Image (tube, rainbow, N blue to C red):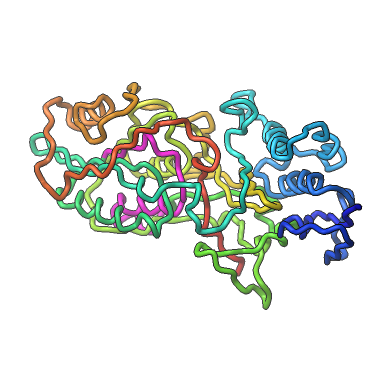
């Protein structure tokens, strides 16, 4: 028995809701929409079509994608017996088409066999506002203390991830309130195990660091492809819009969809809005590694135009792109959707940020230990002396946790996830 569907540029509604039946399906469509793929097929074939059609409109580098007939996903992946293998192979092939002229390699050059550096496909449907599978709320603040040498007070903070702000705000507020007591002029932020997470949380950390004088200054912008910026992405009409709390919204008298979102640069430019009581920071030092990725790199990039920023450790992962989840049948697809640019328009760290001081980190460093190689190097840059002592202030000498897993960031765990997309006005 055949499935009878109409598949348009806007996509098949039944795949999106994960319901299939051996009968005719009526799908509403605007007169201007064009049939671009077969109207009959199997569940797997429709999913293959959907992945390509979404990429054709939503993918950051959609300008290099051919037409549906040329790409022909059904024929291209017909010989792969496992559905999930076929879907991931298709996503990988799409991700390799855009070449970075500076390196001569694809922007999404795989970090291991046929896995895109950024884009990802997972079993299970994406839920805006959910922290499941992205970051562990308990990994936000790993260590917090003040280190002193003579009259110099240096704040130290190790951040293991950027979970949802609602789950990590209290811990971040307390850590920065404790650090502010010492009025430090320099802060060392240890991101060597931080693979990213929610942009909203990384932005909040930036607001905790900066002084009030930066209020209203540009922190960063999210830059979508031209079609997204222009609002010509009809395929997103079949993705329901949910706010950061997972709630639906009404737009022009109907339920809002992701096609109603404001994808303009102006609508996705975020500015500093000072949080907390710390006002004295003049220089920022980041401890980094190949595991420092995504929202962590956004934090570094956003502070560069305004502070004397130094990196200590090893080259970062290199991930200036972000995502929102797209649901196709029983899968969540994270296509590279927007580019992060700081106030100077800088975003070119696809191959990673090079450290100012190269230091090989221990496999399982003791976080906050002034004798640990990376922290010692940072402190020597700040103070010019090796005679360092840990502050005796009980309120600022906090080791929350030590992360032993320093694995390479991959997939959803290193996603720079945007859950604050706003509807057009």
In which quadrant is the C terminus drawn?
Answer: bottom right
Where residue 154 sits in the image (x, y, percent)? Answer: 19, 40
Q: Residue at x 56, y 27 (%)?
A: 111
Q: Nearer the viewer, residue 111 or 104?
A: 111
Q: Position of residue 24 (x, y in %)?
A: 89, 62
Q: Quadrant of residue 120?
A: top right
210 within the magenta span: yes
| Residue positioned most to the bottom | 253
The image quadrant that residue 382 belongs to is top left
Reply above or below: 319 against 385: below
Residue 280 lies, with reference to residue 410, above or below; the image says: below
Q: Can residue 268 be spotted in the picture?
A: yes
Residue furthest right as drawn: 1
Q: Residue at x 67, y 30 (%)?
A: 99
Residue in the image at 80% along x and 49% along y: 43
Tell whether 19 sits left or right of 72. Answer: left
* Camera sees residue 305: no
Where residue 399 sits in the image (x, y, percent)? 22, 42
* Residue found 87% across the figure and 54% down from its top: 3
Observer-nearest residue: 163 or 264? 163
Task: Report the span colored magenta.
Answer: 188-217
Image check: 270 left or right of 32? left
Drawn side of residue 118 relative to residue 83, left or right = left
Q: How many numbered markers are drawn?
A: 0
């Amino acid at each position: 028995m055949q499935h009878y569907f109409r598949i348009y540029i806007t996509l098949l509604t039944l795949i999106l809701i994960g319901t299939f039946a051996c009968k005719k399906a009526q799908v509403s469509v605007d007169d201007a929409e064009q049939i671009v793929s077969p109207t009959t097929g199997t569940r797997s074939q429709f999913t293959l079509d959907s992945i390509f059609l979404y990429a054709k409109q939503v993918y950051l580098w959609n300008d290099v994608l051919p037409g549906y007939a040329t790409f022909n996903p059904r024929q291209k992946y017909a010989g792969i017996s496992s559905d999930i293998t076929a879907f991931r192979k298709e996503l990988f092939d799409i991700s390799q088409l855009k070449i970075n002229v500076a390196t001569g390699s694809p922007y999404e050059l795989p970090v291991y066999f046929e896995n895109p550096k950024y884009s990802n496909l997972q079993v299970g449907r994406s839920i805006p506002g959910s922290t499941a599978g992205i970051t562990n709320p308990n990994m936000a603040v790993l260590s917090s203390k003040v280190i002193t040498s003579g009259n110099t007070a240096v704040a130290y903070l190790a951040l293991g991830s950027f979970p949802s702000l609602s789950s990590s705000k209290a811990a971040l507020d307390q850590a920065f309130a404790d650090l502010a007591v010492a009025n430090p002029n320099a802060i060392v932020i240890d991101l060597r195990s931080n693979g990213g997470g929610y942009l909203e949380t990384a932005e909040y950390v930036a607001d905790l660091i900066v002084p009030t004088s930066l209020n209203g200054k540009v922190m960063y912008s999210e830059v979508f492809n031209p079609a997204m910026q222009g609002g010509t992405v009809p395929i997103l009409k079949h993705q329901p819009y949910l706010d950061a709390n997972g709630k639906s919204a009404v737009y022009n008298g109907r339920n809002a969809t992701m096609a109603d979102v404001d994808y303009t640069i102006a609508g996705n430019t975020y500015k500093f809005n000072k949080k907390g009581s710390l006002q004295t920071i003049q220089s920022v030092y980041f401890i980094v590694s190949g595991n420092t990725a995504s929202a962590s790199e956004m934090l570094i990039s956003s502070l560069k135009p305004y502070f004397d920023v130094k990196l200590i450790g090893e080259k970062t992962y290199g991930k200036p792109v972000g995502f929102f989840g797209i649901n196709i049948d029983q899968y969540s697809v994270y296509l590279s959707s927007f580019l992060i640019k700081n106030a100077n328009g800088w975003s070119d760290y696809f191959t990673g940020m090079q450290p100012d001081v190269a230091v090989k980190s221990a496999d399982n460093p003791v976080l906050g230990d002034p004798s640990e190689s990376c922290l010692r190097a940072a402190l020597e840059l700040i103070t010019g002396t090796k005679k360092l002592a840990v502050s005796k202030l009980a309120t600022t000498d906090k080791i929350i946790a030590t992360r032993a897993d320093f694995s390479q960031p991959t997939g959803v765990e290193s996603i720079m996830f945007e859950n604050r997309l706003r509807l057009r006005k």
